[in-house]
Image (cartoon, rainbow, N blue to C red):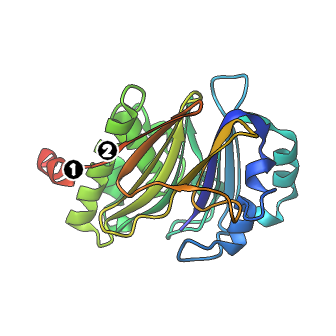
Amino acid sequence: MCRWAAYIGDPIFLEEIVSRPGHSLVRQSHEAVECRTAINADGFGLAWYGDHAEPGLFRDILPAWSDPNLASLTRQVRSRLFLAHVRASTGTATSRNNCHPFAVGRWTFMHNGQIGGYDRFRRDAEMMIPDALYPHRKGATDSEALFLVALGEGLDDDPKGALERATARMEALSRAKGCAPHFRMTAAFADGERLHAVRYASDDQAPTLYHRWSEARAGRAVVSEPLEAGECWEAVPPGSFCTFEGAGVRIERFAPRPDEAALAAE
């Protein structure tokens, strides 16, 4: 399982989330607590929004704790909205193209979890990506495929509905050709203005997800696990879709329908 963190609010240096806290994302890359594996060393990535509509993107295959470029970049770059991820592969190769976040146009996306038996139906999943979006398929992960299918389902106009439909289609494939657990995920994605996050599983083992508003920063962190002990972090319930914009939080039910997706595919 991977670890990730995102932020939206007044601009801050990326290191205030990525490397400075006592249980920062870099610390989690070699000492995670709330996941099956403590080590997340199969690459890392950052996506941040600045003066342009499209985000900046930096990814590499080194462990996050051993890359001096990451430390330098996070110390110098300030952003009002950014996503950061440390990767633990669930089977695909350790390569830059397989590192999160993924970006298409103004959208960025990162994911933690698994789609059960993905190797058994990878070709079917690839066929779900619309032709116009397929040139953006750079890697081999289920995460990137899910992102591109969601874009094809209308992420621009209906973020929650598009991800529900994409999740339902992927879960239906796992149920038909893969294996359990069919779907477990937290994910975060952004369009430069809003930050969305989701916590979902086809069983009762959804990965953890938290958020916290900081008055001092005038911003909100959304994370796989808390960045500091003793702070008041709010746990997101399973089956939830969150939208963060300014200081506002909206949490809605996230309920994909893999049965309907399977019928539609027949």
The reply to whether the C-beta atoms of the residues labelled 2 and 1 are less than 8 Å apart is yes
Nearer the observer, 167 or 215: 215
The residue carrying mark 2 is: 164
Indicate the secondary structure of the residue bearing disc 2: helix
Q: Amino acid at mark 2?
A: Glu
Indicate the secondary structure of the residue bearing disc 1: loop
Image mark for residue 257:
1
Q: Counting other residues with Cα less than 10 Å from the Cα at mark 2, is it few (<14), some (14-19), or many (20 or more)? A: many
Image mark for residue 100:
none
Tag 1 or tag 2, which sits nearer the N-term? 2
| Observer able to see residue 67 | yes
Q: Counting other residues with Cα less than 10 Å from the Cα at mark 1, is it few (<14), some (14-19), or many (20 or more)? A: some
Q: Position of residue 210 (x, y in %)?
A: 54, 55
Q: Amino acid at mark 1?
A: Arg
Please give the name of the residue rendered at 80% of the width and 36% of the height, measured from the top-left corner.
78
Quarter of the rendering containing residue 83: top right
